[in-house]
Amino acid sequence: MSAGPSLLPSVEKGTANNTRFNGELDFAEKPTINPSFNGEPDFAEKPTGWISSRLSPRWLIFWQEVKLQCHLAGPLIAVSLLQMAFQIIAIMFVGHLGELALSSSSIATSVANVTGMCVMMGMASSLETLCGQAFGAKQYRLIGLYLQTGLIVLNILAVFLSFIYGYMGEVLIALGQDEQISLEAGKYAKYLIPTLFAHASSQTLIRFLQTQSLVYPMLVCSGLAAAIHVPLCWLLVYKTSLGFTGAALSTSICNWISVILLYGYIIFSPSCSLTRAPLSLQSLKYMGSFFKLALPSAAMLCLEWWCYEILVLLSGLLQNPELQTSTLSICLNFANITFQIPFGLGVTVSTRVSNELGAGRPQAAYRAVLVGETLTEIQACIVSILVLSFHRVLGHVFSGDSEVIEAVSGMLKLLAISSFLDSNQAVLSGIARGCGWQALGAFINLSSFYIVALPVGACLGFLTPLQARGLWIGVICGPFVQVCLLGLMTWTAKWDKEVSLFLLRMIPSSKLLEQ
């Protein structure tokens, strides 16, 4: 069979030649889409604005990249916070039903996150590389096929993970947890099974949209679902016989509302007309490419996430375990909230870097890295300063116990340091995903958290008077090593070579498209 026209961009003077789409559609001219689609600012007209009009061309391009990343990051941060809100709202309503309902739902949610949500997010993040670089290379049909591949794999995975949800009560009892709490947690988890399948779709659809810089539809869909979640959760928890399991059912229903809205947008919106591929068995041919990145992507995220869960379990073995566990859990919850900001920035940088590498623009990819790191340092400094300034006040938000508040106040000083490091590692991890470095990232996370963080934290927590603070110092050491290694990998990268590696990764996919 004839090889046909080339489907790959060529690297020449930092730009990608316009390509033909599977021999059918000719994009001899750049699509008339906003600059976020193609990565390069459009200076056909004189720049407007007080800042833009006073910058040299070189700094103007940098400033345009800053505006572009802020434009993308804002909605992505909001989407992350809204997704967190589903669980927070459910726990808030359940908390008024008593300690048993609260503890069992909290344990069920925690286990569900570790075994389900974490794995789904990790596997789906491989699409940040595949779809992002394919979009930059204008291989629009390939993006739709990658989407179908991701949906197939994650929904099959959800079937297997649902057994953990279905038998969570028995599993917790086997692990030595309180029998009554375990059985109630098992009931709650069964109502979360539909959420697992919703995540299989939503995590894939979100990557499909974000790599095309279509972030506002995600924000609208998540916002509408969260708004429905509040009255629905109240209704099911307090006005039906479901009781605390009504919160889990409401979470499942509203997650599916968000998924249905996302599907509707992708199917009917003209913005997805180029990347919306008809259902095809051809998507099965990309399983190898998907798994090659999905498995290390999942390992990269899960290794980090599980480390923090292990630290919480270790805190229960310290002296005065109630105080130590409460303190560590509150600080982890607060860290999780503040982490959503750099996480959104990391996703933004991943999108920008993958788009530019796919388009064959190594210098633009490097510029996206510089801008992302600059924004991260500014954000990290602001958050750390705010935490240090209000460390005595923030404890009151989570607890009314004076002993817990005092312990949290002392821990928040350390959290300011870890927040700074977490911000940097979030963006560096985003760069790694955009470049396809997930395998190296997984090895770095394994080394950082299981060779450094956990041993250091355990030694300081159990062998010194620091206790929970010692565990948290381990939390600081892990990301410090992680940032150093990821940073070294990023700043020594040869961006021209990264484009070449992308081309090698695209050759098998392009040949499959031609068949």
Image (cartoon, rainbow, N blue to C red):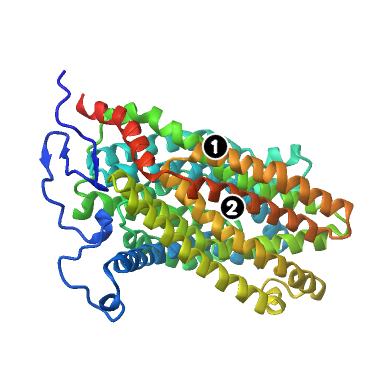
Pick the residue in front: 495 or 410.
495
Residue 94 visible, this orientation: no
Q: Secondary structure at mark 1?
A: helix
Relative image position of residue 224 (x, y in whole percent): 38, 65
Q: Is residue 298 found left or right of 262 in the rendered image?
A: right
Measuring 19% from the left and 46% from the top, which residue is drawn there?
Answer: 274
Pick the residue in front: 359 or 159.
359
Instruction: Point out the tag, 1 or 2, that comes first from the N-terminus.
Output: 1
Relative image position of residue 58 (x, y in whole percent): 30, 65
Quadrant where the N terminus is found in the figure:
top left
Q: Is residue 319 above or below residue 95?
A: above
Pick the residue in front: 202 or 93.
202
Quadrant where the C terminus is found in the figure:
top left
Q: Is residue 348 above or below residue 486?
A: below
Structural crowding at the residue carrying mark 1, measured as other residues with C-alpha within 10 Å and reported as few (<14), some (14–19) or many (≥20): some
Q: Is residue 308 found left or right of 220 in the rendered image?
A: right
Dot 1 amino acid type: Leu
For the residues labelled 1 and 2, the Cα–Cα distance comes to: 32 Å
Measuring 68% from the left and 58% from the top, which residue is drawn there?
Answer: 101
Measuring 22% from the left and 77% from the top, which residue is drawn there?
Answer: 48
Residue 280, quarter of the rendered image:
top left
Dot 2 amino acid type: Val
Q: Is residue 120 found left or right of 219 in the rendered image?
A: right
Residue 254 visible, this orientation: yes
Structural crowding at the residue carrying mark 2, measured as other residues with C-alpha within 10 Å and reported as few (<14), some (14–19) or many (≥20): many
Relative image position of residue 73 (x, y in whole percent): 41, 63
Q: Secondary structure at mark 2?
A: helix
Disc 2 target residue: 483
Disc 1 target residue: 161
Measuring 54% from the left and 51% from the top, which residue is drawn there?
Answer: 487
